[in-house]
Amino acid sequence: MCGIVAIFNISGPMGQLRDKALRMSQKIRHRGPDWSGIYTGHTAILAHERLSIVDPQSGRQPLFSCDRKQILAVNGEIYNHQDLRAQYANSYTFATGSDCESILPLYRDLFADGRDPSNKDIVAMLERLSGIFAFALYDEQREEFLIARDPIGVIPLYIGYDGEGRVYVASELKALEGQCDHYEPFLPGHYYWSRNLGMKRYYRRDWMQYDNVNDNDASADVVRQSLMGAVRRQLMSDVPYGVLLSGGLDSSIVSAVASQYAERRIEDGGRQRAWWPRLHSFAVGLKGAPDLVKARMMADHIGTVHHEVNYTIQEGLDALRDVIYFIETYDVTTVRASTPMYLLARVIRSMGIKMVLSGEGADEIFGGYLYFHKAPSARAFHQETVRKLSKLYLYDCLRANKSLAAWGVEGRVPFLDREFLDVAMRLNPAAKMCPGDKIEKYILREAFADMLPHEVAWRQKEQFSDGVGYSWIDTLKQITAEAVSDDEMAHAHERFPIHTPQNKEEYFYRSIFEEHFPSDSAALSVPSVPSVACSTPEALAWDATFSGKNDPSGRAVHDVHAQAY
């Protein structure tokens, strides 16, 4: 998982700004510990911190077009880069084996035969990219630039501005804090082209409207085949990889599929040898945590080399300050879940593994959170899944990316694969619903039940921050309740007028966050809304028992969770 920094619309001497860009880039070097690169042009500076996953030998960045007129810095993976390479084999000379270089001929094609591209052409170009990405491209010949982020926001990106008219972008807000007058998250599925002002949306789908999907079919077999294709695409790697195996349904499915493709063999002088000798799986939790037992069962079932990482509550508490610095949020659920993931990432990298597959996104697509049992209609259910997907970049995508990137590990999320999303979100929403005692994500379980142990395939949803051990959350609540006084909470709006904390736990995290990121821009970059079991605020109207409640744990759904509060 790389890191990028760029400054555009520069006028005047470059020396001080180049030094500034280097300092900004150094702030995110944890994302790309393998190499650093910088380009200084007429009106732009692009810096890159590289984590080499594909083409470790020649894929250093920034990347240059064959005539060196376009310069590109990318964080991400382009899964269809081989197809794009084949399409441009006769018109473009590739300088590296990097998957990211395929963006350059796509961009240059916009201007082929003297064409003057429009916004519609930019949208068409970005739609041809299948992958997770955030990139900054500078066209030195035309003195223009293009910035874009992947459809769901798997890869983080922020954009900032200063009083001199300069535009800044960076993979993490710590690179922008104190460097420009204002910054904000760069929205997923959007682009910024220097011919226009501001971000513009390019990612639109028919399934975003309920009336376009309510009469569709729903096939478990189609779900299975599409997800297997997504996992296979995302195994693209020239370095050792692994799987995050929590023991829940989603990570177990990804691990089971990955284990099948990881067994492939390649020819070596007439012999058969393994691409990677064994697939490694990783689980984290307090001793005796609900997730760990099921993770071990799943690992034995699919034959991975399994690593169970135990942490203590004190170790988790000791890591909180660093965790909040790296994940750049004070959202309660995200901090709770990021801490064990952050600790796990350190172990993964220490073993020489630089890429892992994860199960993020399935709960948003299939309505897996326990509050979805309360959905009053298929329309409401589907609209909530669309809302949840649109906010993932602020929550689970942010957690998974930044917790891992803190130690130089890349996370990939097959459930959020663009092609799979189009299949899964076009399923008839009625088939996803889980009224009453019907188990959540039934169609997904049905699709992969034969690949999983029964106890895993039909296990009740357990949110990651719960599954690592119930005492983790219980202790956090207790510690923060003792650390923040009633008087401090009564005056919280005076200290934190932006997104005033709604409880003592959020106040505690917000205080640490403010030490690292004191600006208003930083405070505004984090959501602060009431939620039950990770719901959006809109879904609180689904059940009378949710009224006045603000508890993101799955155990807050008292008549659904088997061990509810």
Image: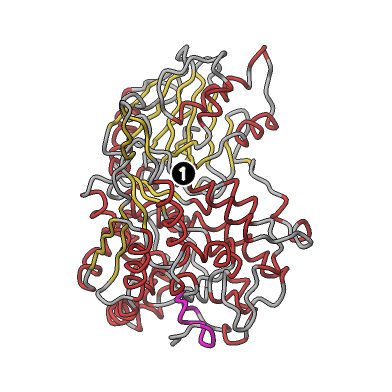
Residue in front for this viewpoint, 5 or 72 = 72
Q: Position of residue 251 (x, y in %)?
A: 43, 61
Tell me if residue 85 comes above or below residue 196 in the rendering: above
Q: Residue 23, located in which quarter of the rendered image?
A: top left
Q: Position of residue 364 (x, y in %)?
A: 56, 62
Q: Quadrant of the N terminus?
A: top left
Q: Is residue 70 left or right of residue 280?
A: right
The secondary structure that dominates the magenta segment is: loop
Disc 1 target residue: 234
Q: Secondary structure at mark 1?
A: helix
Q: Position of residue 409 (x, y in %)?
A: 32, 47
Which residue is at 35% across, 35% downward?
Answer: 238
Q: Quadrant of the C terminus?
A: bottom left
Amino acid type of the residue tagged 1 in the rendering: Gln
Residue 255 lies in the magenta stretch:
no
Give the extent of the magenta segment: 550-560
Q: Residue 478, located in which quarter of the rendered image?
A: bottom left
Residue in front for this viewpoint, 294 or 533 = 294
Residue in front for this viewpoint, 491 or 284 = 284
Which residue is at 35% across, 69% downward?
Answer: 297
Residue 558 lies in the magenta stretch:
yes
Tell me if residue 461 comes above or below residue 1 in the rendering: below
Q: Is residue 127 left or right of residue 369?
A: right
Q: Is residue 393 left or right of residue 12?
A: right
